[in-house]
Image (cartoon, grey):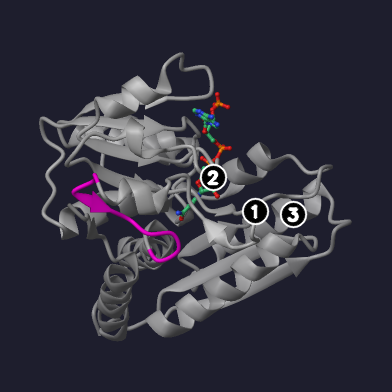
Protein backbone atom coordinates (compact mmCIF):
# COMPACT_ATOMS: atom_id res chain seq x y z
CA UNK A 1 0.00 0.00 0.00
CA UNK A 2 1.21 3.49 -0.77
CA UNK A 3 -0.18 6.37 1.26
CA UNK A 4 -2.23 9.24 -0.08
CA UNK A 5 0.07 12.24 -0.17
CA UNK A 6 -1.52 15.20 1.60
CA UNK A 7 -0.80 18.15 -0.66
CA UNK A 8 -0.34 21.09 1.66
CA UNK A 9 0.74 23.32 -1.17
CA UNK A 10 -2.57 22.91 -2.97
CA UNK A 11 -4.58 23.49 0.20
CA UNK A 12 -2.50 26.58 1.00
CA UNK A 13 -3.13 27.99 -2.47
CA UNK A 14 -6.88 27.49 -2.01
CA UNK A 15 -6.88 29.16 1.44
CA UNK A 16 -4.85 32.11 0.14
CA UNK A 17 -7.16 32.52 -2.83
CA UNK A 18 -10.13 32.60 -0.50
CA UNK A 19 -8.43 35.21 1.71
CA UNK A 20 -7.63 37.32 -1.37
CA UNK A 21 -11.21 37.08 -2.56
CA UNK A 22 -12.65 38.06 0.84
CA UNK A 23 -10.08 40.82 1.38
CA UNK A 24 -11.07 42.35 -1.96
CA UNK A 25 -14.65 42.75 -0.73
CA UNK A 26 -13.64 44.84 2.30
CA UNK A 27 -13.69 48.61 2.45
CA UNK A 28 -10.16 48.58 3.94
CA UNK A 29 -7.43 46.08 3.15
CA UNK A 30 -6.38 43.88 6.10
CA UNK A 31 -2.99 45.02 7.37
CA UNK A 32 -0.08 43.11 8.84
CA UNK A 33 3.08 44.43 10.48
CA UNK A 34 6.17 42.27 10.50
CA UNK A 35 8.70 43.21 13.18
CA UNK A 36 12.24 41.95 12.84
CA UNK A 37 15.05 42.80 15.24
CA UNK A 38 18.62 42.12 14.11
CA UNK A 39 19.93 40.09 11.20
CA UNK A 40 19.03 36.47 11.98
CA UNK A 41 19.18 34.84 8.49
CA UNK A 42 16.21 32.55 9.21
CA UNK A 43 14.07 35.49 10.30
CA UNK A 44 15.16 37.56 7.27
CA UNK A 45 14.10 34.80 4.86
CA UNK A 46 10.86 34.37 6.79
CA UNK A 47 10.13 38.08 6.54
CA UNK A 48 10.56 38.04 2.75
CA UNK A 49 8.15 35.09 2.60
CA UNK A 50 5.55 36.95 4.66
CA UNK A 51 5.74 39.96 2.34
CA UNK A 52 5.14 37.67 -0.67
CA UNK A 53 2.20 35.97 1.06
CA UNK A 54 0.63 39.33 1.93
CA UNK A 55 1.03 40.53 -1.63
CA UNK A 56 -0.65 37.39 -2.99
CA UNK A 57 -3.55 37.75 -0.54
CA UNK A 58 -4.23 41.47 -0.95
CA UNK A 59 -3.03 42.14 2.60
CA UNK A 60 -1.19 45.38 3.27
CA UNK A 61 2.23 44.64 4.77
CA UNK A 62 4.43 47.03 6.72
CA UNK A 63 7.86 45.75 7.73
CA UNK A 64 9.87 47.09 10.67
CA UNK A 65 13.52 46.14 10.56
CA UNK A 66 15.03 47.24 13.83
CA UNK A 67 18.79 47.20 14.47
CA UNK A 68 20.43 44.50 16.59
CA UNK A 69 21.10 47.17 19.25
CA UNK A 70 17.40 47.98 19.76
CA UNK A 71 16.59 48.30 23.47
CA UNK A 72 13.65 46.60 25.15
CA UNK A 73 11.98 49.96 25.62
CA UNK A 74 12.37 50.85 21.93
CA UNK A 75 10.90 47.50 20.88
CA UNK A 76 7.94 47.91 23.24
CA UNK A 77 7.39 51.43 21.85
CA UNK A 78 7.21 50.08 18.29
CA UNK A 79 4.75 47.37 19.35
CA UNK A 80 2.63 49.90 21.23
CA UNK A 81 2.47 52.15 18.15
CA UNK A 82 1.39 49.16 16.05
CA UNK A 83 -1.22 48.22 18.65
CA UNK A 84 -2.73 51.67 18.17
CA UNK A 85 -2.55 51.85 14.36
CA UNK A 86 -5.96 51.29 12.81
CA UNK A 87 -4.56 50.08 9.50
CA UNK A 88 -2.72 47.22 11.22
CA UNK A 89 -4.77 44.15 12.12
CA UNK A 90 -1.99 41.68 12.79
CA UNK A 91 1.45 42.00 14.35
CA UNK A 92 4.04 39.35 13.66
CA UNK A 93 7.14 39.50 15.84
CA UNK A 94 9.85 37.36 14.28
CA UNK A 95 11.96 35.19 16.57
CA UNK A 96 14.58 34.71 17.76
CA UNK A 97 15.13 38.17 19.24
CA UNK A 98 18.71 39.19 20.09
CA UNK A 99 19.75 37.77 23.48
CA UNK A 100 19.46 41.04 25.44
CA UNK A 101 15.72 41.33 24.68
CA UNK A 102 12.93 39.74 26.71
CA UNK A 103 10.85 37.67 24.26
CA UNK A 104 8.00 36.99 26.66
CA UNK A 105 7.60 40.66 27.57
CA UNK A 106 7.56 41.56 23.88
CA UNK A 107 4.95 38.90 23.06
CA UNK A 108 2.82 40.06 25.99
CA UNK A 109 2.98 43.63 24.66
CA UNK A 110 1.12 42.67 21.47
CA UNK A 111 -2.62 43.20 21.73
CA UNK A 112 -4.31 39.76 21.76
CA UNK A 113 -6.71 40.77 18.97
CA UNK A 114 -3.66 41.54 16.78
CA UNK A 115 -1.74 38.41 17.79
CA UNK A 116 -2.16 36.63 14.44
CA UNK A 117 0.45 34.06 15.48
CA UNK A 118 -1.85 32.97 18.33
CA UNK A 119 0.95 32.90 20.91
CA UNK A 120 -0.32 35.47 23.42
CA UNK A 121 -1.28 33.84 26.76
CA UNK A 122 -4.75 35.31 26.38
CA UNK A 123 -5.26 33.48 23.06
CA UNK A 124 -3.66 30.28 24.35
CA UNK A 125 -5.89 30.55 27.43
CA UNK A 126 -8.96 30.88 25.22
CA UNK A 127 -7.82 27.83 23.29
CA UNK A 128 -7.52 25.88 26.54
CA UNK A 129 -10.99 26.99 27.60
CA UNK A 130 -12.48 26.26 24.18
CA UNK A 131 -13.38 29.92 23.65
CA UNK A 132 -13.25 31.29 20.10
CA UNK A 133 -10.09 33.24 19.25
CA UNK A 134 -6.91 33.44 17.19
CA UNK A 135 -5.21 30.04 17.09
CA UNK A 136 -1.53 29.23 16.48
CA UNK A 137 -1.06 28.80 12.73
CA UNK A 138 0.75 25.46 12.49
CA UNK A 139 -1.61 23.36 14.65
CA UNK A 140 -4.64 24.99 13.04
CA UNK A 141 -3.13 24.22 9.64
CA UNK A 142 -2.81 20.55 10.62
CA UNK A 143 -6.51 20.51 11.53
CA UNK A 144 -7.32 22.01 8.13
CA UNK A 145 -5.24 19.37 6.36
CA UNK A 146 -7.12 16.62 8.20
CA UNK A 147 -10.43 18.24 7.28
CA UNK A 148 -9.39 18.63 3.64
CA UNK A 149 -8.78 14.88 3.39
CA UNK A 150 -11.99 13.95 5.21
CA UNK A 151 -10.17 12.67 8.31
CA UNK A 152 -12.30 13.17 11.42
CA UNK A 153 -10.21 13.02 14.62
CA UNK A 154 -13.27 12.17 16.74
CA UNK A 155 -12.71 8.93 18.62
CA UNK A 156 -9.24 8.49 17.10
CA UNK A 157 -6.04 7.88 19.04
CA UNK A 158 -3.73 10.80 18.22
CA UNK A 159 -0.08 10.79 19.22
CA UNK A 160 1.87 14.03 19.05
CA UNK A 161 5.66 13.97 19.25
CA UNK A 162 6.72 17.33 20.73
CA UNK A 163 5.31 19.49 23.52
CA UNK A 164 6.28 23.02 22.49
CA UNK A 165 4.00 25.95 23.19
CA UNK A 166 3.63 26.78 19.49
CA UNK A 167 3.05 23.29 18.08
CA UNK A 168 2.66 20.27 20.37
CA UNK A 169 0.52 21.69 23.20
CA UNK A 170 -1.93 23.72 21.09
CA UNK A 171 -2.17 20.80 18.66
CA UNK A 172 -3.24 18.55 21.52
CA UNK A 173 -5.91 21.03 22.60
CA UNK A 174 -7.31 21.42 19.08
CA UNK A 175 -7.52 17.65 18.67
CA UNK A 176 -9.11 17.27 22.09
CA UNK A 177 -11.74 19.79 21.08
CA UNK A 178 -12.51 17.55 18.13
CA UNK A 179 -13.00 14.57 20.46
CA UNK A 180 -9.72 12.77 19.81
CA UNK A 181 -7.91 10.81 22.53
CA UNK A 182 -4.54 12.52 22.69
CA UNK A 183 -1.09 11.42 23.82
CA UNK A 184 1.76 13.94 23.91
CA UNK A 185 5.32 12.56 23.72
CA UNK A 186 8.62 14.32 24.33
CA UNK A 187 12.29 13.59 24.81
CA UNK A 188 11.68 11.89 28.18
CA UNK A 189 8.97 9.53 26.88
CA UNK A 190 10.33 6.05 27.73
CA UNK A 191 8.99 4.08 24.74
CA UNK A 192 8.31 6.50 21.90
CA UNK A 193 7.97 3.72 19.31
CA UNK A 194 5.16 2.04 21.26
CA UNK A 195 3.29 5.33 21.76
CA UNK A 196 3.54 6.02 18.02
CA UNK A 197 2.39 2.52 17.06
CA UNK A 198 -0.80 3.06 19.05
CA UNK A 199 -1.74 6.09 16.96
CA UNK A 200 -4.45 6.35 14.34
CA UNK A 201 -3.13 9.85 13.67
CA UNK A 202 0.56 10.49 14.31
CA UNK A 203 1.86 14.06 14.32
CA UNK A 204 5.58 14.59 14.62
CA UNK A 205 7.03 17.96 15.61
CA UNK A 206 10.33 17.04 17.23
CA UNK A 207 12.79 18.56 14.79
CA UNK A 208 14.80 15.30 14.52
CA UNK A 209 15.40 13.97 10.99
CA UNK A 210 14.67 10.24 10.69
CA UNK A 211 13.06 10.00 14.15
CA UNK A 212 9.89 8.32 12.90
CA UNK A 213 10.72 5.02 11.21
CA UNK A 214 8.40 2.49 9.56
CA UNK A 215 8.43 0.13 12.56
CA UNK A 216 6.87 2.94 14.66
CA UNK A 217 3.83 3.25 12.41
CA UNK A 218 0.93 0.83 12.15
CA UNK A 219 -0.70 0.02 8.79
CA UNK A 220 -3.27 2.65 7.85
CA UNK A 221 -2.07 5.45 10.12
CA UNK A 222 -2.39 9.12 9.16
CA UNK A 223 1.12 10.59 9.45
CA UNK A 224 1.58 14.35 9.67
CA UNK A 225 5.14 15.62 9.63
CA UNK A 226 5.34 19.13 11.04
CA UNK A 227 9.12 19.30 11.38
CA UNK A 228 11.34 21.39 9.15
CA UNK A 229 14.87 20.17 9.51
CA UNK A 230 18.00 20.57 7.50
CA UNK A 231 19.05 17.08 6.41
CA UNK A 232 22.64 15.84 6.16
CA UNK A 233 22.52 16.79 2.45
CA UNK A 234 21.54 20.35 3.39
CA UNK A 235 18.00 19.90 2.07
CA UNK A 236 14.79 20.54 3.97
CA UNK A 237 13.35 17.39 5.55
CA UNK A 238 10.92 16.36 8.27
CA UNK A 239 11.11 13.88 11.17
CA UNK A 240 9.57 11.01 9.21
CA UNK A 241 11.44 8.45 7.10
CA UNK A 242 9.10 9.24 4.22
CA UNK A 243 9.94 6.50 1.67
CA UNK A 244 9.55 3.70 4.24
CA UNK A 245 6.60 5.13 6.21
CA UNK A 246 4.71 5.94 3.01
CA UNK A 247 4.43 2.18 2.38
CA UNK A 248 2.46 1.67 5.61
CA UNK A 249 0.56 4.90 6.21
CA UNK A 250 -2.88 5.63 4.77
CA UNK A 251 -2.11 9.35 4.47
CA UNK A 252 1.16 11.24 4.77
CA UNK A 253 2.39 14.81 4.43
CA UNK A 254 5.55 15.48 2.43
CA UNK A 255 8.32 17.85 3.55
CA UNK A 256 8.53 20.26 1.84
CA UNK A 257 5.03 20.89 0.54
CA UNK A 258 3.02 19.60 3.51
CA UNK A 259 2.33 21.52 6.70
CA UNK A 260 4.71 24.44 5.94
CA UNK A 261 2.70 26.16 3.19
CA UNK A 262 -0.55 25.63 5.12
CA UNK A 263 0.93 27.37 8.19
CA UNK A 264 1.73 30.40 6.03
CA UNK A 265 -1.74 30.45 4.53
CA UNK A 266 -3.37 30.25 7.96
CA UNK A 267 -1.39 33.31 9.04
CA UNK A 268 -3.07 35.20 6.20
CA UNK A 269 -6.45 33.81 7.21
CA UNK A 270 -5.85 34.88 10.82
CA UNK A 271 -5.02 38.38 9.59
CA UNK A 272 -8.26 38.53 7.63
CA UNK A 273 -10.11 37.26 10.67
CA UNK A 274 -8.53 39.97 12.84
CA UNK A 275 -9.47 42.61 10.27
CA UNK A 276 -13.08 41.45 10.30
CA UNK A 277 -13.08 41.59 14.11
CA UNK A 278 -11.71 45.14 13.87
CA UNK A 279 -14.77 46.18 11.95
CA UNK A 280 -13.49 46.17 8.39
CA UNK A 281 -16.87 45.74 6.78
CA UNK A 282 -17.54 44.49 3.27
CA UNK A 283 -17.42 47.56 0.98
P1 LIG B 1 10.92 22.67 19.95
O1 LIG B 1 10.42 23.81 20.75
O2 LIG B 1 12.38 22.41 19.84
O3 LIG B 1 10.21 21.35 20.51
C1 LIG B 1 10.58 20.08 20.08
C2 LIG B 1 9.83 19.07 20.89
O4 LIG B 1 10.20 17.78 20.44
C3 LIG B 1 10.17 19.12 22.38
O5 LIG B 1 9.00 18.96 23.13
C4 LIG B 1 11.11 17.93 22.58
O6 LIG B 1 11.00 17.32 23.85
C5 LIG B 1 10.60 16.97 21.53
N1 LIG B 1 11.65 16.06 21.10
C6 LIG B 1 12.87 16.38 20.62
N2 LIG B 1 13.58 15.25 20.37
C7 LIG B 1 12.78 14.21 20.68
C8 LIG B 1 12.94 12.82 20.65
N3 LIG B 1 14.08 12.25 20.23
N4 LIG B 1 11.92 12.05 21.05
C9 LIG B 1 10.76 12.59 21.49
N5 LIG B 1 10.55 13.93 21.53
C10 LIG B 1 11.55 14.72 21.13
O7 LIG B 1 10.42 22.75 18.45
P2 LIG B 1 9.08 23.41 17.80
O8 LIG B 1 9.24 24.87 17.75
O9 LIG B 1 7.86 22.80 18.39
O10 LIG B 1 9.25 22.86 16.33
C11 LIG B 1 9.29 21.48 16.07
C12 LIG B 1 9.63 21.23 14.62
O11 LIG B 1 8.57 21.76 13.83
C13 LIG B 1 10.90 21.92 14.14
O12 LIG B 1 11.49 21.10 13.14
C14 LIG B 1 10.39 23.21 13.50
O13 LIG B 1 11.25 23.70 12.49
C15 LIG B 1 9.09 22.73 12.91
N6 LIG B 1 8.07 23.75 12.72
C16 LIG B 1 7.37 23.68 11.55
C17 LIG B 1 6.35 24.55 11.32
C18 LIG B 1 5.57 24.39 10.08
O14 LIG B 1 4.98 25.35 9.61
N7 LIG B 1 5.50 23.19 9.53
C19 LIG B 1 6.07 25.56 12.25
C20 LIG B 1 6.76 25.59 13.45
C21 LIG B 1 7.77 24.67 13.67
P3 LIG B 1 11.40 18.09 25.24
O15 LIG B 1 10.27 19.04 25.50
O16 LIG B 1 11.48 17.00 26.23
O17 LIG B 1 12.69 18.79 24.95
Q: Residue beneath label 2, please?
A: 209
Predominant secondary structure, magenta span: loop
Name the N-terminal-most of marks 3 and 2.
Answer: 3
Residue 164 location in percent, x, y?
50, 34
> Distance from label 2 to label 1 (Cα)?
9 Å
> Distance from label 3 to label 2 (Cα)?
35 Å
> How many numbered discs?
3
In which image quadrant can residue 236 be found?
bottom right
Look at discs 1 and 3 and give the one toward the viewer. 1
Residue at 51% from the left image edge and 56% from the top image edge: 237
Whether residue 116 appears in this view of the structure is yes
Whether residue 134 appears in this view of the structure is no
> Distance from label 1 to label 3 (Cα)?
37 Å
Residue 149 location in percent, x, y?
16, 57
Marks 2,1: beta carbons within 8 A? yes
Q: Residue beneath label 1, please?
A: 232
Disc 3 Cβ-to-ligand 1 distance below 8 Å: no
Residue 53 location in percent, x, y?
46, 76
Look at discs 3 and 2 and give the one toward the viewer. 2
Name the N-terminal-most of marks 2 and 1.
Answer: 2
Disc 2 Cβ-to-ligand 1 distance below 8 Å: no
Q: Which residues are magenta?
A: 248-257
In which image quadrant can residue 75 be found?
bottom right
Inspect the magenta stretch and tell me whether residue 51 lies in it: no
Q: Residue beneath label 3, please?
A: 75
Amino acid sequence: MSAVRMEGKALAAAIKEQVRHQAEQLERRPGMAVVLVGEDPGALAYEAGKRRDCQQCGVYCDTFRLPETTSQEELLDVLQTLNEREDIDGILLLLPLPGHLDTRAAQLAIRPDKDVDGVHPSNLGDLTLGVDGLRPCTPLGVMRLLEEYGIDPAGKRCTIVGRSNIVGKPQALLLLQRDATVTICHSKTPDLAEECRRADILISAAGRPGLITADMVQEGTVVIDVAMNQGADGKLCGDVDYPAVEQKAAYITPVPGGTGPVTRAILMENTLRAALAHGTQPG
